[in-house]
Image: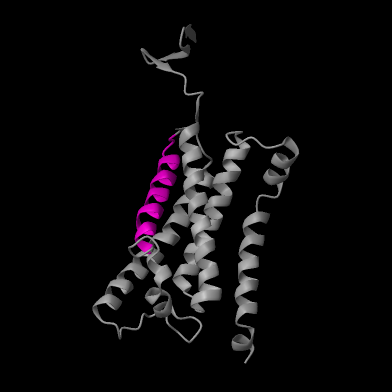
């Protein structure tokens, strides 16, 4: 090991390589989680996008996931909220979930990313989970219908956000009090479980008469 003005340099196989100490990798568990959650959200976005186009071509088209008055993807797709940015929302998912899969595959291959990259991923997942939360509220209390594919994307995004945040807290990319950091690392499963459980309870109580009728 030698030292230069720019920092430590390791020597191997006749080449000098700069240290990657400023870069952070991810565990195989996190890599697989990103691949799996991305792979869950991507087909959900794909199916909804295809059905949306079919609905535009034929207003009488009934999506396969429209099972009853409550679980009705068609009502969701016809709503204004389904095109919040002027185009079908799932088209965002096609891009975002594909990027998450690519990041996960990169980690499996040994990729290491700089601090700004991890923070960018965290901001992206924060936007995703915030947007999903808004869609959940609209679905339950404004549109009055539920989409199963959307629900799959919601859960995938929540799990994704929780564990990307956990990774950044663990590696002190996001700094929190040490007691909170240790608690999150020990009970890492609790935030996503409680979060999805609350959504499940809201869905159950919102249409309680329908489920129990």
Q: Is residue 128 left or right of residue 48?
A: right
Q: Which colour scheme is used?
A: one colour
Residue 196 percent location from the top left of the image: 61, 64
Which residue appears at 65% of the width and 66% of the height?
Answer: 198
Which range is magenta? 90-111
Which residue appears at 59% of the width and 88% of the height?
Answer: 210
Q: In this view, does 74 lie to the left or right of 193?
A: left
Vertical arrangement, residue 16 with respect to residue 97, above or below = above
Residue 150 inside the magenta-drawn segment: no
Vertical arrangement, residue 133 with respect to residue 3, above or below = below
Vertical arrangement, residue 99 with respect to residue 141, above or below = above
Please give the count of numbered marks on the rendered protein: 0
Observer-nearest residue: 168 or 145? 145
Q: Is residue 190 left or right of residue 72?
A: right
Residue 128 percent location from the top left of the image: 48, 55
Name of the residue lying farthest toward the right: 179
Quadrant of image for the C terminus: bottom right
Which residue appears at 40% of the width and 41% of the height?
Answer: 106
Vertical arrangement, residue 16 with respect to residue 180, above or below = above
Residue 181 percent location from the top left of the image: 69, 40
Which residue appears at 55% of the width and 55% of the height?
Answer: 159
Observer-nearest residue: 5 or 138? 138
Residue 107 inside the magenta-drawn segment: yes
Residue 110 percent location from the top left of the image: 44, 36
Q: State whether the magenta stretch is mostly helix, strand or loop.
A: helix
Name of the residue lying farthest toward the bottom: 213
Image quadrant in which you'd find residue 179 = top right
């Amino acid at each position: 090991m030698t030292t230069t003005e720019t920092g430590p340099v390791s020597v191997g196989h006749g080449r000098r390589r700069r240290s990657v100490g400023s870069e952070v990798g991810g565990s195989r568990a996190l890599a697989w989680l990103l691949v799996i959650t991305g792979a869950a959200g991507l087909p959900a976005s794909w199916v909804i996008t295809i059905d949306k186009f079919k609905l535009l071509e034929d207003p009488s088209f009934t999506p396969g996931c429209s099972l009853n008055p409550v679980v009705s993807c068609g009502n969701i797709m016809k709503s204004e909220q389904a095109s919040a940015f002027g185009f079908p929302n799932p088209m965002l998912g096609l891009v975002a979930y594909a990027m998450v899969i690519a990041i996960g595959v990169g980690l499996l291959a040994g990729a290491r990313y700089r601090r700004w990259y991890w923070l960018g991923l965290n901001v992206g997942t924060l936007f995703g989970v915030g947007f999903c939360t808004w869609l959940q509220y609209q679905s339950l209390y404004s549109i009055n219908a539920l989409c199963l594919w959307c629900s799959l994307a919601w859960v995938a995004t929540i799990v994704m956000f929780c564990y990307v945040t956990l990774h950044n807290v663990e590696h002190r990319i996001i700094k929190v009090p040490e007691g909170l950091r240790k608690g999150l690392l020990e009970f890492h499963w609790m935030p996503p479980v409680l979060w999805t459980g609350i959504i499940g309870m809201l869905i159950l109580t919102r249409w309680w008469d329908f489920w129990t009728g």
